[in-house]
Structures are given as C-alpha cells and as structure tokens.
Image (tube, rainbow, N blue to C red):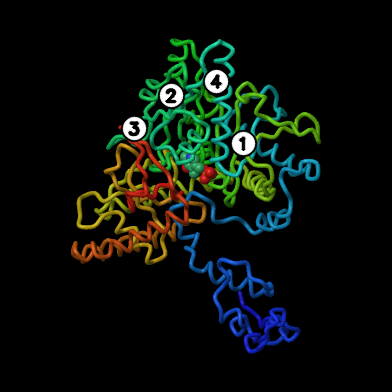
C-alpha cells in the first residue's frame, strides 16, 4: 500500500516541556511517517505512551513491525486457513462489531449458527427424526474448546450414571492414542480425568482399536479417536473401534461412548472418502468436533462440536438464555466472542456446497499425492503419511537413510527461503522417528508445490556439500529459531512417557515442534 504524506509534523524539532505540545496543529504538514518524530524513536513497548499518535502513524508502525512475521502463505506447518474470498472478508468486516452471545440483539446470527450446526451434523450423518429437525451442537473458538466441552459432557454423563447406580464416581479416565493433539492433554488435566494412552511404536503411529478397548474399564468416560492424526494425517479406525467397544460394553455391562476428533478430517473425509464409516453412522459415536478454521476453510477462530442426541449432553451443563424461547441454549467456555467467524462459516457452506468442497478436497489430495511421489523419486525421502485420500492431504516424510544432516537441518535451510515446514519427532514412544510435514491447504496450488520441491532439493544438495562439522556449527541458531517459534506458539506442554514420568518437552528442543499446527 502506498503511504501518502501524513498529518504529522516534525515535532521532534519543537522544544517544549509541555507534552501536549508534541502534537500540534502544524502536524498537518507534508512529511511521511518516516519524517516524523515517531519514526526517530522506539515504538512503545512497556508503558502505555502518555500522548496520542495519529491513526496512520500507529497503523504504519505496527504494520512494519509485523513484517517480521513469517508469510502465512508459505507456512506449511499449519492446518489453519490462510485464504478466503473477498466477498466473505467483506461480510466478516461488516459484522466485526457484533458480539455473538447477544442472541436477543442479533437473532439472525444465532439462527445462522444453528443452520451451520444442522448442516454439519447432517454431513456427519447424525440420526434425524425428520428433515427439518435442528441438530444439537454449538460453535466454538476452535476444536480445543469443542474437545473440552465434549470431555465435560462425557464426564458428567458417566458421573450421573455412576451415582444413579450408587457407585464411586471419583476416578474417571479417558482412553486415547499418545498421538493426540495437545488440547486433549489440556482437557484431561483441566477436568481432572486420568488419561490412558495407547502408545505409538516405531512403525505404528496411531491408536489401534484392540489396545484402546483393552484399556477400557468401568471408570472410562469415553474413547477418543482421531480422524486425521496431527503427526501423520492417518485416520484412526473408528469402525473397528466401534465394533470392539460394543462387545466390551456388552461383556462388562457398560455404555462407554466414542468421541471423534475430526478437527482436520471432518471436512475432508466426507468429500474424499464418503464411504469411510467414522461418524454418527457408527452407533457408539456420541460426539464429534471439527475445526471450521482448518479444512472448514475459515480464518482462525471457529470450531464446532456436534452431539448425536440430547442424551449425550447432560442438561445441567447447558445454560438456557431465554431471550428467544427455550431453544436458545448456551454451552461454551466463554461468554462474548466475535460473530464474524460464524457468519463466515455459513458463507463457506452455502457458497461451496458439497460440490465445491469435493473439488477443493480432491485437488488437495491430488497435490499431496503428487508431492509424495516427487519426494520418493528424489531418492532421498521416505513417506510416512497415507496417500490416495486414506488420510489428510498432507505429506509427512523423513530421510530414507542416515546422513550427516537430519530433518531439522532441512527445515532450517528451507526457512531461509521463507518456507515454514516443521520438523519434529513422533509421538511417545516412537520419538526416535524424526520427520517433516507439509500440510496441503486450499491455497497450496500445484505450481507452488513445484517451487517447494525445487527448493527442497536445493536444500538437500546444499547440505550434501557441507561437512558434518559445518552443519553442527550452524545448529545452535536453528535450535534458537525453533525455540523462538515454540515460544511464539506458546506451546508448553508435558507428555507423560510410558514410565508415567512427566517430561517437560522444553528440555528436548528442537525435537518437539509438533504443537505447531
Ligand atoms: C488442530 C487440532 C486440534 C486443535 O484444534 P484447534 O481448532 O486448533 O483448537 C485438535 N485435534 C486435532 C487432531 C487437531 O489437528
């Protein structure tokens, strides 16, 4: 954007003890921001400044600071949407001032949320009594909030049943794979639920249904299955889990439900693999979350939680806001939030329709397959993700033999070109496996893919030429870089290893960047 001469004067030339004199009528002169005193002094960092500054100066100073951020388009670490059409951006800007929770004032926004819930529930094959039935679910800030709410519902439902049976309800546990996204660890810690992990191995990176069901007992509030592992994009086998769990429930007289974490896969699988049974078609699936801001194709700030039927969402967790009648139920962790993202999701759903989603997701899957093939053809890499639409459209890869550099060195080299690709180690107990991951998003077209392949090969050829000592010398800066990324992402999580000890992952940098998603 061209910055026109702004309304600021060379106020630093004015010698006056009166602070208010810094901004003068003469501010209306012809210099640019960079000729003003604001450009000659550091930007306020700690104390709120005592004086105002003109809006154009504030805008330009902050915009310039943000130039040091990475380029979202080249950020292949993240599942989160970086492209939306102009029309929806306009719609979002027009609705930026609405508070979503003000149902009474903004009844149409609320109605739009309910329409999204109904559409997404039907996409996930929720059982319906009639075609106009409203579904049970809510918008959230993202899958993390949705997952915390779903855990809360599972825990409360289990507690009520235990109390009804006169049994102890103080030791709830939740079964999941060690490849879960960090929000699951948050959920169980915040809600005081014992996590029971199915650990990964050197050649299996997901939860196997057999092992999961093995861990289930009378204190299990639910089993979490992931449709699209953050690490490798694999879809966990929800169908087999459902069948085995049905048997176990029968044997032990339990009714343990399944929650599917479809943060990434919820808007992919229905279009790319419609025949895959992972959703409410399976009788034990009680709730599903999906991130509207991942393959739901909205900007960051929207997620969804859908329940199969009211029996899975205990009434005492729901707060009824009776402005618009009994239907206006509220189940969220926060009160106020922006309405624009909910409206944006509705735009995406009706603008693209199933056909539009199918075209986009098919393209992404094709691009992922092409990238995987090209990487194998280089002779350097081995692919760890699943192709042909059997997993998320991403490519997880590692070097196919031991070399004097590793996946972290490659990621650091690519960063010099602007590409942001995470290198990380696999989930517990497969941490010896190092890998890189490229997430294929809507705006990652085939031509951008070709550029990446070229730069990736330039990176390995460069590293091939360096000796081990030189690479080692360069590493501390790479490590600092990853440290910084982690700090920015505020990823401070602990994993419980198989011995049951907590390991602060911060000690192992740069090995853990899997939180970058
Ligand atoms: C991204 C992700 C989450 C967290 O979702 P947010 O929408 O970022 O809160 C949870 N689970 C899985 C599998 C994910 O990929």
Of labels 2 and 1, earlier in sequence is 1
Q: Are marks 2 and 4 in contact (CB under 8 Å)?
A: no
Helix, strand, or loop for circle 2? helix
Instruction: Find the residue positioned furthest to the front.
Output: 17
Between residue 352 and residue 326, name the one nearer to us.
326
Residue at image x 29%, y 59%? Answer: 409
Give the mark nearer the N terminus: 4 vs 1. Answer: 1
Q: Spatial distance from mark 2 to mark 1, Cα to Cα?
A: 23 Å
* Residue 130: quadrant of the picture: top right
- Image side of residue 317 versus residue 399, left or right: right
Whole-number angstrom distance, CA of label 2 to CA of label 4:
19 Å
The image shows residue 309 at horizontal and vertical percentages of 63, 24
Q: Are marks 4 and 3 in contact (CB under 8 Å)?
A: no
Report which residue position mark 4 lands on.
158
Q: Earlier in the sequence, mark 2 or mark 4?
A: 4
Answer yes or no: disc 1 within 8 Å of ligand 1: no
First in sequence: mark 2 vs mark 3: 2
User: Who's the residue at 56% across and 82% down the image?
Assistant: 40
* Circle 4 SS class: helix
Disc on res. 241: 2
> Which mark lies nearer to you, 2 or 1?
2
Q: Is residue 172 left or right of residue 141?
A: left
Q: Residue at x 26, y 43 (%)?
A: 432
At 81% across and 35% down in the image, what residue appears?
324
Q: Using the rendered view, name the quadrant where residue 124 is placed.
A: top right
Q: Secondary structure at mark 1?
A: helix
The residue indicated by pointer 1 is: 120
Residue 507, given in percent of the width and then of the height, sits at 33, 49
Up the image or down, 209 lies above or below 427; here it is: above
Mark sitting earlier along the chain (4/3): 4
Say if disc 4 is inside 8 Å of ligand 1: no
Q: Is residue 373 visible?
A: no
């Amino acid at each position: 954007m061209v910055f026109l001469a702004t309304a600021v004067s060379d106020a630093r030339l004015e010698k006056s003890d009166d602070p208010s004199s810094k901004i003068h009528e003469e501010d209306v002169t012809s210099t640019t921001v960079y000729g003003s005193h604001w450009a000659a002094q550091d930007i306020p960092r700690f104390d709120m400044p005592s004086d105002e500054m003109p809006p154009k100066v504030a805008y330009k100073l902050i915009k310039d600071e943000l130039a040091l951020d990475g380029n979202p388009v080249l950020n292949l670490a993240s599942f989160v949407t970086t492209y939306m059409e102009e029309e929806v951006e306009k719609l979002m800007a027009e609705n930026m001032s609405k508070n979503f929770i003000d149902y009474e004032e903004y009844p149409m926004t609320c109605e739009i949320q309910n329409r999204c819930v109904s559409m997404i529930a039907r996409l996930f094959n929720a059982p319906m009594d009639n075609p106009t039935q409203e579904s049970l679910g809510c918008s959230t800030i993202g899958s993390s909030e949705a997952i915390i709410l779903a855990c809360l519902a599972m825990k409360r439902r289990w507690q009520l049943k235990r109390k009804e049976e006169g049994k102890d309800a103080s030791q709830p546990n939740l079964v999941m794979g060690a490849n879960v996204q960090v929000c699951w660890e948050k959920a169980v810690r915040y809600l005081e639920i014992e996590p029971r992990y199915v650990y990964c191995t050197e050649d299996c990176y997901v939860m196997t249904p057999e092992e999961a069901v093995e861990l289930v007992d009378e204190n299990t509030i639910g089993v979490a299955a992931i449709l699209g592992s953050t690490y490798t994009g694999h879809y966990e086998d929800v169908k087999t889990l459902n069948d085995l769990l049905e048997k176990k429930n029968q044997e032990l007289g339990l009714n343990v439900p399944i929650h599917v974490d479809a943060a990434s896969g919820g808007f992919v699988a229905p279009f790319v693999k419609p025949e895959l049974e992972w959703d409410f078609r399976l009788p034990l699936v009680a709730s599903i979350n999906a991130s509207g801001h991942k393959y739901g194709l909205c900007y960051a700030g929207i997620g969804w939680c859908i329940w199969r039927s009211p029996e899975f969402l205990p009434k005492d967790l729901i707060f009824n806001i009776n402005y618009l009648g009994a239907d206006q139920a509220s189940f969220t962790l926060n009160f106020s939030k922006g309405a624009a993202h909910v409206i944006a999701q509705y735009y995406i759903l009706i603008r693209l329709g199933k056909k539009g989603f199918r075209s986009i997701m098919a393209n992404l899957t094709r691009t992922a397959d092409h990238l995987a093939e090209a990487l194998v053809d280089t002779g350097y890499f081995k692919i760890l993700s699943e192709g042909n639409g059997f997993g998320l459209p991403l490519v997880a890869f590692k070097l196919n033999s031991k070399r004097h550099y590793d996946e972290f060195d490659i990621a650091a080299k690519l960063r010099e070109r602007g590409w942001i690709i995470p290198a990380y180690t696999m989930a517990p107990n497969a941490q010896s496996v190092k890998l890189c991951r490229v997430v294929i998003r809507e705006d990652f077209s085939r031509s951008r893919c070709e550029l990446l392949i070229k730069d990736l090969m330039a990176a390995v050829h460069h590293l091939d030429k360096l000796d081990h000592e030189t690479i080692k010398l360069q590493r501390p800066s790479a490590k600092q870089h990853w440290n910084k990324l982690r700090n920015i992402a505020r990823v401070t999580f602990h994993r419980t290893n198989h011995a049951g000890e907590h390991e602060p992952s911060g000690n192992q940098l740069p090995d853990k960047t899997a939180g970058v998603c």
